Amino acid sequence: MRIDFTQLVRRARIGARRLWLTYGVFWVGAILVGLVAVAYAKLVDGAFALFSLAVGYAAWLPLLITPAIGVAAVWLTRRYFPGSEGSGIPQVIATVKSSEPERRDALLSLRVMVGKILVSTLGMLGGYTIGREGPSVHIGAAVMYTMRRAYPRSSSRIDRQFIVAGGAAGLAAAFNTPLAGVIFAFEEINKNFEQRTSGTLITAILFAGIVALAIAGDYNYFGRIQVPQEYPPHLVIAVLCTGLVTGLSGGAFGWLMLNLARWVPARLRALRSDRPYRFALLCGVVLALLGVASGGITFGSGYREAQALLSDHESVSILYAPLKAAALLITYLVGMPGGIFAPTLSIGAGVGQLVGLVFPEVPLSALIALAMVGYLAAVTQAPITSFVIMMEMTDGHGMMIALMATAVIASTLSKAMTPPLYESLARAYLGPLAEPARR
C-alpha cells in the first residue's frame, strides 16, 4: 500500500489552519487581554504614585494639576476618543444588547481602547476618583472584538460571545478574581445565559488569568482579613444592620448618579452641556480643594485607605465615606474615563468603620468587609458578583455566608430606591448612531 505523503501534509495543513481559525484566534485574543489588563494596571498605579509623590512634595500642587488634567481629559475624550468616557461597562452592555455592527465598531474600536487607557491614566495622574475595573472590562471587550475580525465566521451571536468573554477576562485578569469575572459576565454584561457562551467565557478567563498570574503572581488584592471563627449572635445583628445601612446609602448614591436633573442646579447643568471645559475646570478645582482639605484621602481609587482599614493598621476620618462619595460624584460629572468598583469599595470601607463604632465586639476588619460588599451590591445591584469579588480579593471564604447575606439585603433595598445603574447608563449608548459612526 503506497502512502501519499503529499496528501497527508496537505490535510494536516488544512486541519491546522481550521484549528487556528476556530480556536487559535480566540486563545490569542484571551492572552492579549491578560497582557493588556496587567500592563494597564501597572500604568495607572504608576500614574497615581507620581501624583502622590507630587502631593508629598507640595500639598497645594493638586490645585494646579487636578483642574488642568480635568480640562485636558474632557478635550481629549470629546475631540479624539468619543465613547471612552465613564466606566466602560455601560458601553459593553450596550454592544451586547444591540444587533448593529456599526454600534459595536464605534464603541469597541482600537481608538476607543487607546483613549480609555490614555485618558484614565491621565485622570489618575490628576488624582481623580476612578478605578480600573470598568476600563479593564471595556478594554478586554475591545481587544476580543478586534480579534473577532480574524474569526472565519461572523454573526451577532459570535460577536456577543467574544465581547462578553473579553469583558469578563479583563475583570478577572485585573484583580486576580476569575470566579468574579464569570459571575459578572452573566449577572451584568449578558443576562441571557447560553451554554456555548459559558464555555467560551471560561476559556477566555483561564487564558487571561494564566497570563496575569505569570506576570503579577498569585495575590489577594486587599490582602487577607481576620475571619471570625464562629458566628455569635452580635455578628448576625451586625450583618443585618450593615446590610440596612449600606443598602440605603448605596441606593441613595446610585439614585444621585442616575438623577442629575433632580439635584444638580440648572445653571451647573447648562454649564456642563454648553461649556464642558469650564465645567471640568470648576469640578477640578472643587475636587482639588476637597482633597487638600481632607489631607489627600479623597484622591485616587481609595485602595490604600480600604486596605489600611481592612488590615487594622490605621483608621481614617469618620467623614471619609461621605467625602469619598462626593469626590466620586464629581469625577462622574466630569465624565472622566474610569470605573466605580474600587472607589465604591473604598466608600464601603469608610461606612464599615462607622458601623464598627456600634459593634466594638465584632472584629473591625470583618465589619469593613461586610460594608464594602454591601455598598458595592447596593450601587451596582449585582449581589452575587459583589460578594464573590470581595471573597476573592480578601481570601474571605470563611465569611461567605455573612458576605452573601449582606449583599442580598443591601441590593434588595437599593432596588426599591433606584433602577440598576449600569443598565440605565447603557441606554445612553443605545440611541441613534452619530453620522461618523455610520460612515
Image (cartoon, rainbow, N blue to C red):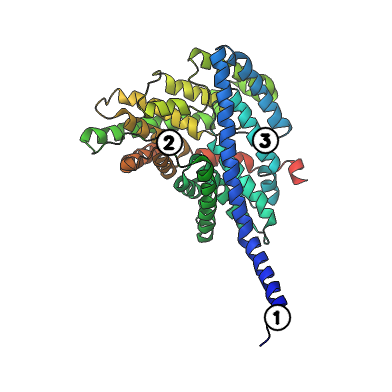
Residue 115 has which mark? 3
Q: Which mark is first along the chain, 1 or 3?
A: 1
Q: Earlier in the sequence, mark 2 or mark 3?
A: 3
Query: What kind of element bears circle 2?
Result: helix
Kindly report the distance in space between the C-alpha atoms of the residues bearing marks 3 and 1.
54 Å
The N terminus - image quarter: bottom right
Marks 3 and 1 close (CB-CB < 8 Å): no
Amino acid, disc 3: Gly
| Amino acid at the residue labelled 2 | Ala
The amino acid type of the residue labelled 1 equals: Asp
What's the residue at 54%, 42% (across, down)? 215
Residue at 68% over, 31% down = 77
Question: Residue 41: which quarter of the image?
Answer: top right
Q: Work out whether 129 lies above or below 431.
A: above
- Is any part of residue 130 visible from this angle? yes
Front residue of 59/429: it is 59
Tell me the residue that label 2 is attached to. Answer: 378
Identity of the residue furthest to the left in this view: 233
- Residue 86 image position (x, y, % from top left): 60, 33
Say which residue label 1 marks: 4
Is 394 on the left-hand or right-hand side of 174? left
Relative to 299, is 232 above or below?
below
Q: Position of residue 26 (x, y in %)?
A: 61, 55
Image location of residue 167, percent across then percent down: 56, 46
Please report contact status of discs 1 and 2: CB closer than 8 Å, yes or no.
no
Left or right of residue 332, residue 405 in this image: left
